[in-house]
Image: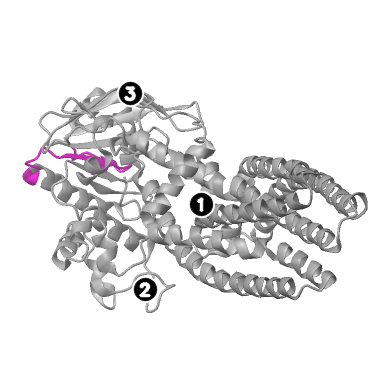
Amino acid sequence: MLSPDPAPDLPPALSSLLRTLRFGYRVEPRLLVWSLIMVLFTAIPDALVALWLKWLTDGVQSGQRTTILVASLGLACSATLTWHLGVVLERADRRFRDRVSIAFEAHVARLLASVATVEHHERTTYVDRLQVLRDHVFALDHLFASMFTTLGWALRLAITLALLATIHPALLLLVVFAVPTLLVATKRPEIERVIEERAAPNQRLARHLFLQDTTASPAKEVRVLRIGEQLARERRAAADRWYAAVSRATWHSALWHALAWSIFGAAFTGAVVFVAIGMRGSPGAVLLVVVAGARLSQYVGAVVGELGFLRGIWLDSGRRLAWLEDYAERLARHRDVAVPERIERGIELSHVSFCYPGTDKLVLDDVSVLLPAGSVVAVVGENGAGKSTLVKLLCGMYVPDSGRIEIDGISLDTLPVVKWRERLAGAFQDFFRFEFQAQRTVGLGELSQLDERPAAERAVGRAGADDVITQLPSGLDTQLGPRWDKGQELSFGQWQKLALARGLMREGPLLLILDEPTAALDAETEHALFARFAEASKTVAANGRVTVLVSHRFSTVRMADRIVVMDGAKVVEVGAHEELLAKGGPYSELYAIQAQAFR
């Protein structure tokens, strides 16, 4: 059984960095190389300013006009080239970052959508990790700029050290005193990022409460219950808890940062005193040490800062991106068996058990049941019995913790999830409101027929949603959602009918799932719709289609060929309606209770 690692570590920094670089090179190879070259060329004239100033000072002191002229021209060229190359670099870098940013965002979206299961949306370890990645995905384009800039500062640093060495080799020791700043810069962001990830639940809670207090969906309840101020207080408390944890880590690392810079500052002061007094250097030599030393401080600070950002946000985001790539690839591994064109025997669950991520409570406990080919199977049971979880496993949204799900003997976890879902159709009780034109809101159910009006009309008819379309001002061309220009708001029941139509766009599926998709409709309408589905399944399912109905209304499920009764995460009964009534078991009791309510 394929089972995801409960808490896989992030990939090594160097490995993930190389993968990120390869991705950027594939997206924009020419702009990447051009940006790197421009960064290095820009560094040279800037680093030579200290040399020109030394020559200028020595020339003025000795009265050598040639030296003064060369130094002046050198300063002019350095200033001009630094400005000119900087402008060109900014344009190239901006274009490269824009292109790469778009590519990174699309890449992350594709990865999240392609992951076989939805566990990464619910396991807290994954959710916190993805929260940080989503927050920083827009910064991934800065990774390249940060790396190139770091190389540029490093080149400046090398040139400056070479200039200092011409005065005295001992001045190279300034680099040694810069080591503490480098160590702090590489360690500080890692510590802060760990704390940020630990505090991510509070950040997510603060965001969740903010949306509850400021968006339209909960607005009525917030006002009627008068809980707006309470939500605002809880949001502030969650945000304060997040900030307190992050702030403590920031202050702690900042103190170490200040100490490291104090060590370097003392060494720089000592270097100036050593040249001016100990060596009795010329004014030009002293000026070179002062300027080069000051620039050395600037360059070291820039390198330290870039390394901090590189190690912290951008390199860390690269590791999270590499983790997401590995996670998606690992779940897709071993899924190379062709999806059958038809179902001959049925879909069988054998001793399937499952717990939701982060819990040890069995939602499905040793479930074994056969869903015969060509049949309509109803799944009933009280809330929390495991009905929707069973549906999610059939869709491949989760992998069972134990047991197997097989289609004609082929294990579901060996089928490519994309290909399997191409053979699924249906609708769910927790549908999403896609606020597009009605045509597209329905057409999303089958991308190959997204803009085909006849296909959408057939799906609307199958879902019994013709009344919804006829009430819209422009029919299928109507924009849905009041937030858009000329957008129309729908009732919950109307949205649900369109969601059902979207789920029925796909024709000829192997598995049709209807997980309480009509809960907002009256019992008579639901019964008529399900009767139509059941009849269609018996007459057109030449591919052995299995139809799974989940409903609390027994007047609906009685038409099914087979009824699966769930209770306490287990399957307690299986049979046809009359057969189960004759047994006098749980189904019979539940049916009698519901029937009594309608007398």
Q: In front here: 184 or 408?
A: 184
- Identified by mark 2, the residue type is Gln
- Compare marks 1 and 2 and give the one earlier in the sequence: 1
Residue 475, percent from left and from top: 24, 74
Residue 116 image point, x, y percent: 34, 39
Q: Are marks 1 and 3 in contact (CB under 8 Å)?
A: no
Mark 1 and mark 2: Cα distance apart in space = 31 Å
Question: Are the residues tagged 2 and 3 within 8 Å (C-beta)?
Answer: no
Q: Which mark is residue 134?
A: 1
- Mark 1 vs mark 2: in front: 1
Q: Which residue is mark 2?
A: 488
The stretch in magenta equals 539-560
| Residue type at tag 3 | Met
Q: Which residue is mark 3?
A: 1
Q: Position of residue 213 (x, y in %)?
A: 60, 61
What colour scheme governs how the chains and residues are painted in the rendered image of this protein? one colour
Residue occupying image coordinates x 25% and y 41%: 549
